[in-house]
Image: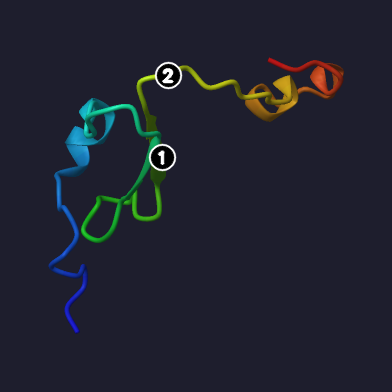
Amino acid sequence: MAFPPTSWDIRHLEDMDKILNLTEGDDLTIIPLLAVKPASGAEGDFRFIIEGAHPISVRVKASDILPASSLSRYFT
């Protein structure tokens, strides 16, 4: 079996920050992106693109974004 599978959409690592608008319509879609060899040391880096026609709400602890114990009681 070949890796990556031929059914995967293969893109250049440099494009990872530019990939947007991969879906159409009202459906909420989550698209995983994963850097694999050869990726110049970035192997294992990943990103999830979440797209849809309607806003979603996400609650995240501020200390998960900025690792400071003084922020542990705050949420974004």
Q: Is residue 75 left or right of residue 7?
A: right
Rendered image: mark on residue 48: 1
Mark 1 falls on what kind of element?
Answer: strand
In this rendering, the answer to whether 31 lies above or below 1 is above
Earlier-in-chain disc, 2 versus 1:
1
- The x, y position of residue 23, in whole percent, is 24, 33
- Residue lying at the far bottom of the rendered structure: 1
- The x, y position of residue 17, in whole percent, is 27, 29
Disc 1 crowd, CA 10 A, few/some/many (<14, 14-19, 20+): few
Q: Quadrant of residue 57?
A: top right
Q: Using the image as rendered, state which of residue 64 and residue 43 is in the foreground.
A: 64
| Quarter of the image where the N terminus is located | bottom left
The residue depicted at 40 percent of the width and 34 percent of the height is 28
Disc 2 crowd, CA 10 A, few/some/many (<14, 14-19, 20+): few
Q: Is residue 12 left or right of residue 61?
A: left
Q: Is residue 65 left or right of residue 8?
A: right
Q: Quadrant of residue 69?
A: top right
Q: Using the image as rendered, state which of residue 35 and residue 75 is in the foreground.
A: 75
| Quarter of the image where the C terminus is located | top right
- The x, y position of residue 60, in whole percent, is 68, 25
Query: Which residue type carries mark 2?
Result: His
Q: Using the image as rendered, state which of residue 7 and residue 44 is in the foreground.
A: 7
**CA gap, disc 2 to disc 1?**
17 Å
Q: Is residue 32 left or right of residue 3?
A: right
In this rendering, the answer to whether 8 lies above or below 66 is below
Q: Which residue is mark 2?
A: 54
Rendered image: mark on residue 9: none
The residue depicted at 35 percent of the width and 20 percent of the height is 53
